[in-house]
Image (cartoon, rainbow, N blue to C red):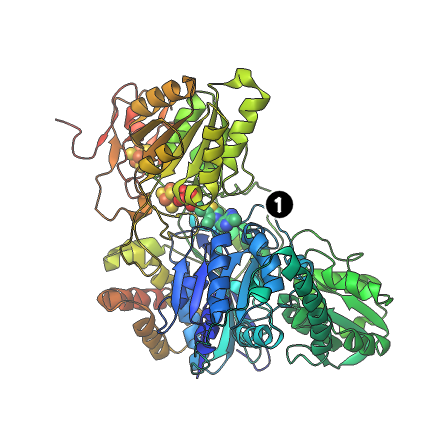
Amino acid sequence: MSNGKVTNILIVGVGGQGTILASRILSYLALEDGHDVKVSEIHGMAQRGGSVVTQVRMGEKVYSPLISEGQADVILAFERLEALRWIHFLKKEGTIIINDQAIDPVPVIMGVQEYPDGIVERIKEKVPDTIAVNAMQIATDCGNAKASNVVLMGVLARKMGFDKEKCIRALEAKVPAKFLELNKNAFEKGWSVDL
Amino acid sequence: MKELLTGNEAIARGAYEFGVRVAAAYPGTPSTEILENLVSYPGVYAQWSPNEKVALEVGAGAAIGGARTLVTMKHVGVNVAADPLFTLSYTGVNAGLVLVSADDPGMHSSQNEQDNRNYARFAKIPVLEPSNSQEAKDMVGLGLEISEQFDTPVMLRTTTRVNHSQSFVEIGERSGDDVKPYVKDPRKYVMVPAHARGRHVVVEERRAKLAEYAESCPASRIEWGDRKIGIIASGIIYEYIKEVVPGASVLKLGMTFPLPEKLIREFAAQVDELYVIEELEPFLEDQVRLMGIEVRGKQLFSRIGEVNQRMIAEKILSVTGHRDLVNESILAAGVPEEKEIQVPVRPPVMCPGCPHRGVFYTLSQLKMTVTGDIGCYTLGALPPLEAMDTCICMGASVGAALGMEKAHPEMHGKVVAVIGDSTFMHSGITGLLDVAYNKGATTTVILDNSTTAMTGHQDHPATGRTLSKEVTNQVDLVGLVKALGINRVQVVDAFDLENLKKILSEEAAADEPSVIIVRRPCALLVKEKTVPYTIDENCINCKKCMKLGCPALSARGDAVVVNTALCTGCGLCSQLCPSGALKKEGAGNE
Ligand SMILES: Cc1ncc(C[n+]2csc(CCOP(=O)(O)OP(=O)(O)O)c2C)c(N)n1
Ligand code: SF4
Ligand code: SF4
């Protein structure tokens, strides 16, 4: 994070995927580093399996809690289709981290629309800095598929150059003690994914 | 100490720090979390009321009684509470009362996007608009002070972006929570015409005094920058402006009614181009124009939806001669939007195992005309169920069914009102009373899922628990409905499709009004582990089960599959399967 500049991170996914933990950890890290931070989350109908978006902005001084189109430095997408839906929020030279998982939206379940093939390849054509990981698989190997969000956090933290020790402290502060070991492990696996 | 808080957490914190003793609300996005947070602070009594009107009346009593009070609601809640609000403006308060109106430009979770600043002007009460969490907290304190100093209720008007965004807040101590004595004063508090005539004079005098106060209100200020561009703004828009037009002069208004006329004139006189940027109605703009000041506002910005940073940059650049003051980087093109392939939409859906699903499936099978209401069950209006004809406001379903029946007597037996349990408590009871009183013959279905699910699972009078989770008197729905004059009342299991169909057909056909209470807790409240269903080789691919719109069933490719991670085992799909292919997991090969 360079001085005076605001770093914009857009976290997108589907209701129930645990996107909120990622924003909690990010704001904890920003706070530790003495940065200003603003986070925006829209609740409501989105809780029922709709698209969810969390916006995190950090820097010396942050005014708006919202990220404009084309302004995100990083998009962390918890699901392929959501990555594609929000791709135009990414800066030209931005980074996108995609959880290579598909969750069918209702029109697809009903068979009235098709879930597009080759989303990751499509995004790679547009964005050279695309990182696709199967976080669900990695989390399952760690013992619980629900830790996918922390695996992704590990990938993001390394990519963004956060201090690993601080990240672990953030986890200790933000996840319930009984899941801490699992989450530390998941974070570690995410951190060591090839970038 | 600083903490990162949402606007709602900050308002709750503010209520605590500034000595609020009593708080009342009915849930509604984006306001709900204020009371959910406030209830855990010591020394504050906080409650859910059955609706916003009652919440404000409880607040009125508490404030007249002498305790600092907070009442919160979403924007449309103020419609419900408007009656007490307009006369509370006449009586005034004793201890401070702040009414939070959480508006929702863009309708993230609402049925309209009314601009409630108009209520402040209409009811002649001051309104404050915070831009971030720190201001949200501070303005609770300021609002209480203004309320006491000028003897008026004060509106704190937020928007979704302020309620649901987190920013840093300086944490302080609690003070000012002594309860004042209550002093009987019928000329002030008993609004019969003779007294109210006198109070209206007081209200008009108060308005003039508040306008004078507005000139030096600490929440409003001029931030001089380059005087070529001057922008008047309030709320979240102020934050956008600081980012998009960082060099411009800004008149930031924390109090937006009454307006500081002198301050506005001073500002307007010293800038070359004057803009008012605001979401929804030209509330500030119209008043500035009435002062005879030329200003650009709604000619550039729509009355519809939210304003964002890009829009501000684009609109100002479209007219200004001073491009250098606009941060054009906000318009830099990013990665192009995906246009070549269609990205399927992801609308919200009823959860797997939702107790509302079977009711709407049955209603669609019976081809009923359904006057609907607001809650999770409004999703029954969407494909594939599509079993709802109207949704207007909370409680409207019951009256609308009666009206439809009176307009079209031949539709008897085909019109059904559907309403959730929390909504029935909120404003359905009086509608049903009307049906009984005026000899309607409609059927009302009450969807009793033991919660207010839509807004995040709050308790209400029919759940038997309070905001603080204490056990309390629980409304007996059957007894209540009977007492209103409805003789035909049935209680049905939400997961028994055959019985649902039978009872719905019978009750709709009856010549007198009826109520069907459909029971099952919201799937998200059920904690016991359930056994999912699976599909076996007997599936003939008829896709009858797919008509339920359950997200745990998918018909991707040819075959129907059950996502066992999502399935709650409600069994609706197996009741529709003609070949017995859907079975509880583990029951397959017996
Ligand atoms: C006047 C008003 N107050 C609050 C709301 C917000 N709101 C929408 S639906 C709802 C209640 C839903 O509860 P219920 O009727 O039990 O249905 P459920 O969501 O549980 O299915 C609330 C509080 C509103 N739309 N209008
Ligand atoms: S939250 Fe409850 S009531 Fe709402 S859709 Fe889900 S199961 Fe149904
Ligand atoms: S039993 Fe059938 S309808 Fe019920 S949740 Fe499972 S898949 Fe959906």
- Location of residue B72 in the rendering, given as x and y in whole percent from the top left corner: 50, 61
Describe residue A25's horizontal placement relative to residue B211 as left or right. Answer: left
Comparing B432 with B524, the one in front is B432
Is there any visible trace of residue A28 in the rendered image?
yes
| Residue located at (75% from left, 76% from top) | B248
Q: Is residue A195 visible?
A: no
Expressed as whole percent of the image width and height from the top left, the position of residue B133 reads 53, 72
Q: Residue furthest top?
A: B410
Residue B232 at what x, y percent from top left?
74, 70
Task: Check disc 1 and give the amino acid type.
Answer: Lys
The quarter of the rendered structure image containing the N terminus of chain B is bottom left
Does B300 sit left or right of A101 as displayed?
Answer: right
The correct choice, above or below, for B149 with respect to B459 in the image is: below
Q: Ligand 2 is in which quadrant of the figure?
A: top left
Left or right of A71: which side holds B375?
left
Residue sitting nearer the eye, B502 or A5: B502
Disc 1 designates what residue?
B339
In the rendered image, the vertical position of residue B271 relative to residue B7, given as above or below: below
